[in-house]
Amino acid sequence: MANSWLFLSPTRFEAAFLKGRKFDFHGRAGLRGEGWVWLECGIGKANTAMTLAAFAQRRKVGRALLFGIAGAYAESGLQIGEAVLAEREIQADLGIRDGGMKGMGFPTLVVGGSEGSPLHFHNRFPLDKALTAELKATLDLPVRSFLSRDLVSENPTEARELSRKWEADVENMEGAAFAQACLWLGLPGAELRAVSNVAGVRDKAQWRVRQAVEALEAAVLKLT
């Protein structure tokens, strides 16, 4: 059980390649396989945090992986169809505009403290270093900085400003909540995204969702 995987994806189509025994968890679609469980966590930060916390309360989780499609910022150097791992997640729409939660004067999350000083987190949440390094070696993927917002970039100018302000490469709607919940739960967590579009480009004719899901498939099936 120590090495069992909990896979999460915001939607079913991002995990359509997984085959297992179907089950339902609080209305979320689920699959069970050998050494892994997959859950549809829902779109957005609240859905993701709720699903992870509720499942971890009821079942032993050895390690967790959030995967899905995402937008890459134009200056990131990432290509459409490329898969990438998260080093850290940034919650970019919490706190004040120019100072985040640190600017407000208090942290979003405090963990530890039984031995040594507790760790304070404001808007930046690291993914598990050891697990991410293991996946980097296994999957031969780059590791970058991710950014999460409830509102995605609606044009290239907005996307460029966010990327530069937060020094981020990839934009999504769930990862910061996942990373924060993993820290709170003491759960080794990693995040994998495949680029379906350039962040800020809302014309879906320019998106390559199928190509991105194929990249997810190639990576995730190596872990099952």
Image: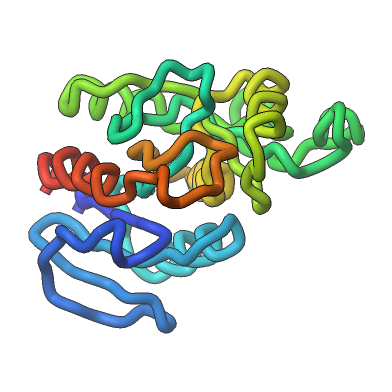
Q: Picture quarter containing residue 199?
A: top right
- Report the side of 189 relative to 44 (left or right): left
Q: Is residue 96 visible?
A: yes
- Report the side of 151 relative to 29 (left or right): right
Front one among 13 and 141? 13
x 57%, y 24%: residue? 168
Where residue 189 sits: x, y (%)? Answer: 39, 41
- Report the side of 175 relative to 142 (left or right): right
- Report the side of 6 relative to 54 (left or right): left
Q: Picture quarter containing residue 164?
A: top right
Where residue 120 sits: x, y (%)? Answer: 71, 30
Where residue 159 sits: x, y (%)? Answer: 64, 32
How many numbered marks are there? 0
Where residue 100 sits: x, y (%)? Answer: 81, 33
Q: Is residue 192 visible?
A: no
Front one among 7 and 13? 13
x 29%, y 30%: residue? 82
Decide: is 166 above or below 125: above
Decide: is 78 above or below 104: above
x 59%, y 56%: residue? 45
x 78%, y 36%: residue? 107
| Colour scheme employed for the rendering of this structure | rainbow
